[in-house]
Amino acid sequence: MNEEQHINPDTAWNTTEEKRCTLVGMTCDVCLSAVKIAAGILGRSSAILADGIHSISDTVTDALVYAMVRLSGKGVDERYRYGRGKYETLAAFLISIILVVVAVGLMTEGVQDVMAAIKGEALERPHNIALIVGLIAVVVKEGLYHYTRLKGKKTSSKALAAYAWHHRADALSTAATLLGVAGAMFLGERWRVLDPIAAIAVSVLILVLSYRLGRPAVEELLEVSLPQDEQDKIADIITSTPGVKSFHNLRTRRNGNLRVVDIHIKVDGEMSVTSSHDITKNIERQLSEALGEIMTNIHVEPYRGHDHCEKIS
């Protein structure tokens, strides 16, 4: 029996753009945090002040993503034979947890403010600087969302994809805060309750986003198989490869940007080692062309007439 393990030569993670993207986000978040906190204090806006304090958590997230990207970019070595791709998956999962914590905090504060308004407590009218800084923050964070999302698609980075949604969530949170600020400034005291109501709505949205980000990360960490259509594509490629009589024991999973495929194939028992090696290389090439970055572990066995291909279901 012959066992071949192939790693696509193009699977080394190119993290230069990911690092640059994360550093841009970190710089912007530090500046926004300082500006919003100052505007909240000078502009007498508790909403903008709270939003600035919330932005501090973004810098922690930025540092987390940056550290994970650096670790995942080291690739394969003697200790990490499958690479460090799951560092990015772990980062995506941790970001989803941070989003849950932020959402729960926003919801709790929103409910408390609504209850206070119902009891007749009045909120202080904010100054113009609070509204101006809030608008700038929304524009900057929305711009960071689009910038990071495009970089995430280009590099196939789960961490950057999650990071992009974190920017979007922060932009939505600030936008909701602005509704309350604008209401307090232009609609009168009785409309200042719009601020906590909007915060509650946004917190629900952030919870949904955190679920959408966290579920795929958890599935990958638990090594859930690739989607059925991808497994079917793998089976079709293997069975259509010249020299393959049948296959069995197909196992698949993701590891960061990589799709990992383990498979046992059966070939003519009289075939030379060189010929069977060429077959495995052909399969690896086709899988790479069809699925992108892959790591394959192909075990070769002699074919017997009664052997059949396993069913993928």
Image (cartoon, rainbow, N blue to C red):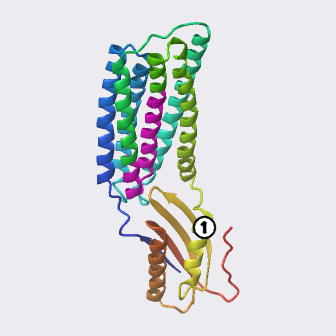
- 190 sits to left or right of 288: right
Residue lying at the far front in this picture: please name it: 187
Tell me the magenta residue range: 148-176
What is the quadrant of the C terminus in the image? bottom right
Q: Quadrant of residue 68?
A: top left
Please say whether residue 150 is one of the residues in the magenta stretch.
yes
Magenta residues, dominant SS class: helix
- 6 sits to left or right of 302: left
Q: Nearer the viewer, residue 51 or 75?
A: 51
Q: Nearer the viewer, residue 50 or 272?
A: 50
Give the labeled residue for mark 1.
229
Please say whether residue 105 is one of the residues in the magenta stretch.
no
Mark 1: few/some/many CA within 10 Å (<14, 14-19, 20+): few
Query: Is 118 above or below relative to 301?
Result: above
Residue 235 x %, y %:
59, 75
Query: Is 61 above or below relative to 74?
Result: above
Residue at point 46%, 81% (across, down): 282
Residue 33 x %, y %:
34, 27
Residue lying at the far right in this picture: please name it: 306
For badge 1, the amino acid type reads Asp
Residue at point 41%, 30% (across, down): 57
Asked whether residue 93 is in view, the answer is yes
Residue at point 52%, 67% (across, down): 261
Residue at point 32%, 46% (across, down): 21
Q: Nearer the viewer, residue 21 or 262?
A: 21
Residue 79 x %, y %:
39, 55
Q: Quadrant of residue 268?
A: bottom right
Residue 53 x %, y %:
40, 23
Q: Nearer the viewer, residue 152 or 261?
A: 152
Q: Quadrant of residue 107?
A: top right
Element type at marker 1? helix
